[in-house]
């Protein structure tokens, strides 16, 4: 490894919590578990409305709900209220109350771990520590109840965030969690791990995870979180490296020469004005990649193939600039032309330069100083104007390296801005499998059925003999809507697995053909093409009986 890509180990890293005292970590986990400091436990304590408000970073309802609970006659309720106020609301608590709520580790243990300090008899936290978890699968496997340490968020502290701020559980990180297709993988890479959210999920279906970050503080938080949750994640604190490798360095530098079956990344994709002479210490490392415009996302998608094993997949989030007079997909397509990869971009939203500036200035609390806000806002607008940018897109990216000797089978660039089913990862995975099926099979010889979630919708003018609009709608997954021609609607209605595609098309030719202007070959080819698209999008599926699935 190079000097900028080295194995990260234990230690006290610049105001990050300590992970080199396993006995204290074990005591802390035991205390938190004993008072039900979990997602469900906190929700039950606060109530539905206050809990929902806290999810929006609105703390007042939770403050009001917990004020009276710290005096509850129920010791368990009182203890949980003290801890919720201490960490989730960043309200100082007395040493006596903290010692009572967390009797195993006590106040001194929190201080020793770098989680808090004592000032005039009260305990003040210096990091956020909150419950996090996900439900088990239908077979009862895969669920988890964890705790995640990160830096205090903007609503928990005054002033602008520190530039090496370690972000907690945010919208982008949960979006990537929901987007990732979970399948067993020997080696996975979490690129830009932050506080470790993606790594926690990867450990449930991957044999080994390498987690990288350019920030030593971020890796220190990740290591703390892994060891605090060692029992739940089935990690051996004495042999962490057997399941997780933590690497310090920029982008793919820490894993040069290595390959992985799965790469996930919530990279520092935020487009931030660059200034002459700035250093990395001037950037918010959790979000700013340090390159002009959308260069960080472009560089990553163009180099990711180098760390993917044949058949390996990369899933990530990103921003891309949309310049005046172009379509949003033009830029991503240019990045990946002749890449030799399967490519799927889904744009989920697009905002104008003003909205973008407002979002990210507020994100780092840079809107609290009026003059700084004005200057920074102007810098964003000038930066975008210098490249003729009229909008910024955000979305999901899926890239796959084909198996040796195989060609790419899909290249999709689509905009889906309406609500979709979450988690969407299983549906993305199923779509990739359908693309592989189409590439390996003859669609005309296939027997198809309509997917269970698909419904048909017809619209016609009052008194009209026939519908003017026929739609197929998906109730699950990406929830697409497909406008059907009369012949395609007739085809879909006949898909019960009994007849092959070729047989149904032949019947439609007999029913609708015969006129002088009827081009039978063009009709067949057009219908085969439309049917293939319905399979790729999941409206029609290979019949499991006929296909032997």
Image (cartoon, rainbow, N blue to C red):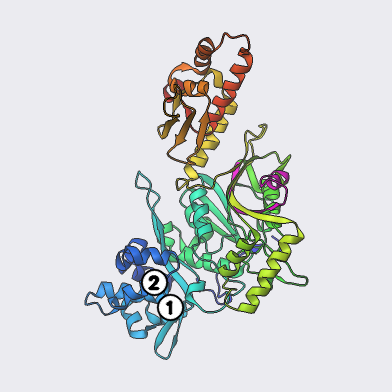
* Residue 48 drawn at (x, y percent): 32, 62
Picture layout, residue 406 above or below residue 304:
above
Q: Which residue is mark 1?
A: 110
| Tag 1 and tag 2, C-beta contact below 8 Å | yes
Q: Element at badge 1?
A: helix
Picture layout, residue 70 above or below residue 169:
below
Q: Is residue 36 left or right of residue 299?
A: left
Q: Can residue 213 be seen in the rendering of this structure? A: no
Q: Element at badge 2?
A: helix
Q: Is residue 149 left or right of residue 188?
A: left
Q: Residue at x 47, y 42 (%)?
A: 426
* Mark identifier at residue 471: none
Q: Is residue 164 left or right of residue 42?
A: right
Picture layout, residue 276 above or below residue 353:
below
* Residue at the left extreme, as displayed: 73
Find out whether residue 313 is within the magenta segment: yes
How far separated are the C-alphas under marks 1 and 2? 8 Å
Q: Nearer the viewer, residue 313 or 498?
A: 498
Q: Which residues are magenta?
A: 312-334
* Residue 371 drawn at (x, y percent): 65, 78
Find out whether residue 453 is within the magenta segment: no
Q: Which residue is mark 2?
A: 28
Write down the quadrant of residue 56 in the picture.
bottom left
| Mark 2, other Cα within 10 Å: few <14 / some 14–19 / many ≥20 | many
| Mark 1, other Cα within 10 Å: few <14 / some 14–19 / many ≥20 | many
Question: If the image is split into quadrants, where does the C terminus sit?
Answer: top left
């Amino acid at each position: 490894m190079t000097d900028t890509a080295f194995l990260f180990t234990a230690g006290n890293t610049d105001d990050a919590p300590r992970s080199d005292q396993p006995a204290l970590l074990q005591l802390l986990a035991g205390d938190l578990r004993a008072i039900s400091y979990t997602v469900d436990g906190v929700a039950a304590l606060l109530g539905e409305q206050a809990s929902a408000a806290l999810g929006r970073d609105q703390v007042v309802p939770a403050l009001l709900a917990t004020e009276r609970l710290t005096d509850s006659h129920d010791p368990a309720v009182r203890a949980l209220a003290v801890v919720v106020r201490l960490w989730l609301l960043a309200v100082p608590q007395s040493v006596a109350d903290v010692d009572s709520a967390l009797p195993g580790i006590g106040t001194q243990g929190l201080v020793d771990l770098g989680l808090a300090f004592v000032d005039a008899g009260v305990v003040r936290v210096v990091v956020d520590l909150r419950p996090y978890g996900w439900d088990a699968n239908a077979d009862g496997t895969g669920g988890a109840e964890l705790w995640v340490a990160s830096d205090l968020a903007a609503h928990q502290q005054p002033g602008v965030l520190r530039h090496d701020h370690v972000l907690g559980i945010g919208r982008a990180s949960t979006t990537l969690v929901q987007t990732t297709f979970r399948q067993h993988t020997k080696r996975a890479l979490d690129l830009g791990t932050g506080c470790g959210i993606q790594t926690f999920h990867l450990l449930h279906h991957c044999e080994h995870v390498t987690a990288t970050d350019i920030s030593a503080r971020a890796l220190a938080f990740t290591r703390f979180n892994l060891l605090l949750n060692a029992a739940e994640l089935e990690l051996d604190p004495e042999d962490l490296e057997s399941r997780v490798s933590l690497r310090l360095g920029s982008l793919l530098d820490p894993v040069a020469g290595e390959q992985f079956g799965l790469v996930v990344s919530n990279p520092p994709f935020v487009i931030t004005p660059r200034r002459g002479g700035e250093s990395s210490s001037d950037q918010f490392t959790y979000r700013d990649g340090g390159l002009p415009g959308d260069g960080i996302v472009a560089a990553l998608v163009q180099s990711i193939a180098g760390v993917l094993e044949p058949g390996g997949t990369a899933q990530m989030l990103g921003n891309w600039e949309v310049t005046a007079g172009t379509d949003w997909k033009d830029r991503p397509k240019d990045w990946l032309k002749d890449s030799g990869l399967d490519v799927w971009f889904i744009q989920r939203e697009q905002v104008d330069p003003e909205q973008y500036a407002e979002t990210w200035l507020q994100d780092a609390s840079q809107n609290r100083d009026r003059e700084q806000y004005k200057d920074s806002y102007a810098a964003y607008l000038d930066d975008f104007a210098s490249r003729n940018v009229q909008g910024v897109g955000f979305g999901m990216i899926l890239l796959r390296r084909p198996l040796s000797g195989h060609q790419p089978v899909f290249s999709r660039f689509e905009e889906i801005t309406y609500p979709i089913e979450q988690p969407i990862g299983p549906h993305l995975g199923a779509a990739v499998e359908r693309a592989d099926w189409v590439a390996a099979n003859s669609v005309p010889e296939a027997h198809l059925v309509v997917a269970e979630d698909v419904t048909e919708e017809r619209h016609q003018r009052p008194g009209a003999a026939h519908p003017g609009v026929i739609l197929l709608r998906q109730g699950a997954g990406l929830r697409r809507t497909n406008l059907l021609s009369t012949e395609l609607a007739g085809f879909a209605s006949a898909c019960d697995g009994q007849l092959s595609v070729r047989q149904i098309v032949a019947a439609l030719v007999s029913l609708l053909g015969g006129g002088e202007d009827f081009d039978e070959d063009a009709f067949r080819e057009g219908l085969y093409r439309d049917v293939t698209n319905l399979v790729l999008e999941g409206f029609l599926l290979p019949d499991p009986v006929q296909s032997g699935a």
